[in-house]
Amino acid sequence: PVPSLLPGEKRPTLTSPQPPSSRPPCLLLVQVSKNYRSVIRACMEDMHQAAISTRDSALQSQYSIQVSILSAMELIWNLCEILFVEAAPAGPLLLRLLDWVQLHICDVDNMVREVLSSENPSKHKLFWNVVDIFVLQGRMDEARHLLSKEAIANPTSMNMYKILDDLMKKMPVPSLGNTQTLTEMELKWQHWHEECQRYLQDGTFASNSHMESICKILLGDENAILEKKELMTTWYHFLVTRLLYSHPTVKPMELRFYAQSSMDMFLGEESSPEPLDTILMAAFEFELHQVIKECSVALSNWWFVAHLTDLLDHCKLLQSHNLYFGSNMREFLLLEYASGLFSHPSLWQLGVDYFDHCPEYGRVYLELHIERIPLNTEQKALKVLRICEQRQMHEQVRSICKIMAMKALRNNRLGSALSWSIRAKDAAFATLISDRFLKDYCERGCFSDLDLIDNLGPSMLLSDRLTFLGKYREFHRLYGEKRFSEAARLLLMLMTAHIAPCSFWMTLLTDALPLLEQKEVIFSAEQTYELMRCLEDLTAGKLNRQKFQDDDVETMKVEMLRLALARNLARVIVKEGTLEGS
Amino acid sequence: MEEVCARFVSQKISKARWRPLPAAALQPPDLFATGSWDNEDNRVSVWSVGDVGSAGLNGEYQGEPQLLCDIRHNGDVMDMQFLDQERIVVASSTGSVTIFRHHQNNQTLSASHRWENAHYHADQYTACGGAACTGVICNNPEIVTVGEDGRINLFRADQKDAVRTIDNADSSTLHAVTFLRTTEILTVNSIGQLKIWDFRQQRNEPAQIFSLTGDRVPLHCVDRHPSQQHIVATGGQDGMLSIWDIRQGTMPVSLLNAHEAEMWEVHFHPSNPDHLFTCSEDGSLWHWDTSTDVSEKPSFLHQGGRSTAYISHSTINQSVVSAWLSNDPTKDRMEITNLIPNQTLSVNTLDVLGPCLVYGTDAEAIYVNRQLFA
């Protein structure tokens, strides 16, 4: 029951930031990348809160693991943003990497707080650790601030302090703007480096080992830096510190050499790289595909890989080499992720959006997935249908409506079934429903669900059978209202226009009986002839099929009909032959 | 510019309702309940919104809804209504209707009563399957529910069994229900019919049936004008808003083409009935405003000192007749505004009370606007 905040919260910024065709400016993509990261951080925060507030230790460890995974994700993403999305050039690259390192080594802040809040910071046992870490992370101002406290407390080292402070102040750093070119910066740095070298060789700091090691760090002495391994905790911190003090104008493409050697030096012989290390190394080597591959393997969640790939694809960094099943990597990963969403009970709506952004296979995947969403209420079915209709997925609309209509039919909800078949414009199903109604009528002698049949309106025209049903009911209504001649006309029309199915003709003719037996003559001669013709058609057809089956009731009915028709004919001929009132 | 506070919750919101204010209350509502749907674990939650204008610790505007308490709910929340200040009736997709009690003192929710099989399909081949209960309306202590099984139930809050059940009231799904008078209800169904049912009559037939002209588009929501009880508004599957006058005719008085997809809820504002709100699957929430300003009548009506008094009297008369029933909404002033600047997923629910509007979406967010008429 780990809260699945991850997929849900991503909603506002996910999927393709721009549709595949347009060319968004770099800045926009950096912003998008920052958004993603802030979302990861928000998740981390929530997970952290959950971890500290829960009492169940198993749950707590689970949450803590999640938090560490999320922080690793953010670390990787941040590095990718610096190297790939922003593509920081030499100069700013180092500054970005410094920021990156500062952001992710958080033990420092606790230590710093502890030292600063103590009464006598310079006497604190961690004092020099803090100064060192500031230097290692290039936070010169803060280091100098702390050192000044030491200088005040220890006036004897005032001279040394002044020199060190001066060196630190003068250290050239790459600027973000265009105020100096790289060559200028390199010259200045070289000059400064030599000055530091001189002071060290003169033995200026010989009496204070701490200050001496700081000076060595400033000179980029790898051994001196490596001594502070515990403070740096990771090889990539070591890498950045090394670069800061030995090659601040490093170019992106040169990173790989430093990265490999840094990792080797830091880890030494004992430990082997962990998955995170491999991923970061691949990033430093600018092997994008390797990064994605390693991330896919290491992380169980497709979210990270799918979105990162999508972002990189928008930076036009992924060569679209076709995978052997035909789509490119970005689309493949998005499809995988979206398919995963569909297996979640409520995230299918998000999945639809993802599929929309996959130009090649998205639609096919969507068509297959959308039919398989479990529909437990009509409202959910309506939402799914709306999605299908918006994308002109007519097959799916028909299929879903048919499923819902069948369900309704099985539950004896004939009105619902009809409304589903109207939505799908499914004439065949409407015919099925009408047959059901008619069957009910034949069995019970009355209509069920009159509210439906009486109010069919234009939907009556969906299927012939439905039209017949509506008209037949109208006939009954007319009869009930004693509008006999209209009823008679309607009845005849139902048969002659072949709206009525043949199986129903007997019933219709039987319905005509009471009209024939009325005191007043209703059917005209023409109409009576028509009726007789219908009867003959019916019996002729029957005779051929049922030669040896003698149904008494049937034959009696036919005889009664013949008699009634003959009598009516007689009366009507007389009536029509009589001159109208003279 | 209205202040809308959004709150992202990791569940899709199907219903949101303001807690009703006590009769003589002057302050705006400060508490609302929401229900979720489509999760394995759905919840009914109660939220509070701070006072408008109160500064937080940092002086920021603190309007974001705060979760007070929530409780697990079995099945999707299909409809929800406050029975009184403390009790909420919730209709579930499993066919059960539950009364939850909100305990103010320790901010918890508990289920105080449940009618387990309020709605079900009686299948001759298998055991009774649950049918979703799609609508619930309360008039303390009576509760009326309708469902996909076409059944209407009348419950009383303190009684275990239904007071009255109309089986097979409708052959199609009943989507929504509302009270017309204390003993009469209005229902809408999926074949485009609006029916009046009178509980004083013993027979199980509707007292009156109204239907749409043209295609029988399913109707999803219904609401009655708060003061003029013959005016009824319904929303359909094609997003059309229909206004009916139930004193006359069987067809709607006006049909207004509104949304592009199903209209899920329609509400007259309870104290300003010239304002109507609708929300839809297409992600928009519309505010329909027919309140006309007397001073803006064309000048030729003001013909002189003597008749001015008469004219203003007649214009007052006219507004009582209600702009909703006028045949040409384009001629009279009706302002329609979409309150959502960037639409994404469906707005499933809305509720208005006083100056406050709350709405919930499928994008797993709740929005509150506490200065609706500012």
Image (cartoon, grey):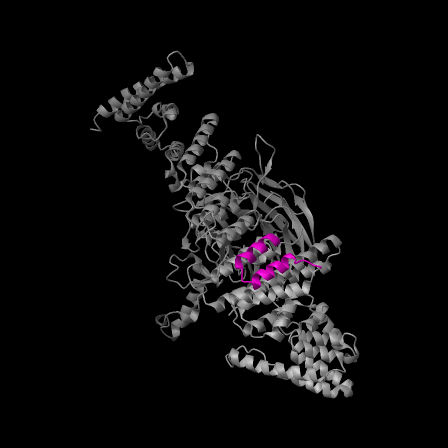
Q: Say if A543 sits above or below B240 in the image.
A: above
Direction front: furthest residue: A201
Q: Using the image as rendered, state which of residue B349 and residue A119 is in the foreground.
A: A119
Direction top: furthest residue: A548
Asked whether residue B251 appears in the rendered view, the answer is: yes
For this view, does A183 lie left or right of residue A5? left
**Residue A133 percent across, percent down from the top left:** 69, 73
Asked whether residue A7 appears in the rendered view, the answer is: no
Quarter occupied by the C terminus of chain A: top left
Image quadrant where residue A232 sits: bottom right
Image quadrant where residue A130 sits: bottom right
Which residue: 51% across, 70% down? B1
Q: Say if A356 sits above or below A441 in the image.
A: below
**Residue A189 percent across, percent down from the top left:** 58, 80
Q: Say if A195 sits above or below B225 in the image.
A: below
For this view, does A146 lie left or right of residue B352? right
Q: Using the image as rendered, state which of residue B10 and residue B175 is in the foreground.
A: B10
Which residue: 28% across, 26% down? A527
- As for residue A290 lying within the magenta part, the answer is yes
**Residue B256 percent across, percent down from the top left:** 41, 55
- As for residue B303 lying within the magenta part, the answer is no
Q: Using the image as rendered, state which of residue A238 and residue B96 is in the foreground.
A: A238
Q: Using the image as rendered, state which of residue A72 and residue A440 is in the foreground.
A: A72
For this view, does B77 lie left or right of residue A423? right
For this view, does A321 lie left or right of residue A509? right
Residues rendered magenta in the picture: A270-299
Image quadrant where residue B148 sits: top right
Q: Say if B289 sits above or below A331 in the image.
A: below
- Our reading of the magenta stretch's main secondary structure is helix
Counting the numbered discs, the total is 0
**Residue A187 percent across, percent down from the top left:** 55, 81
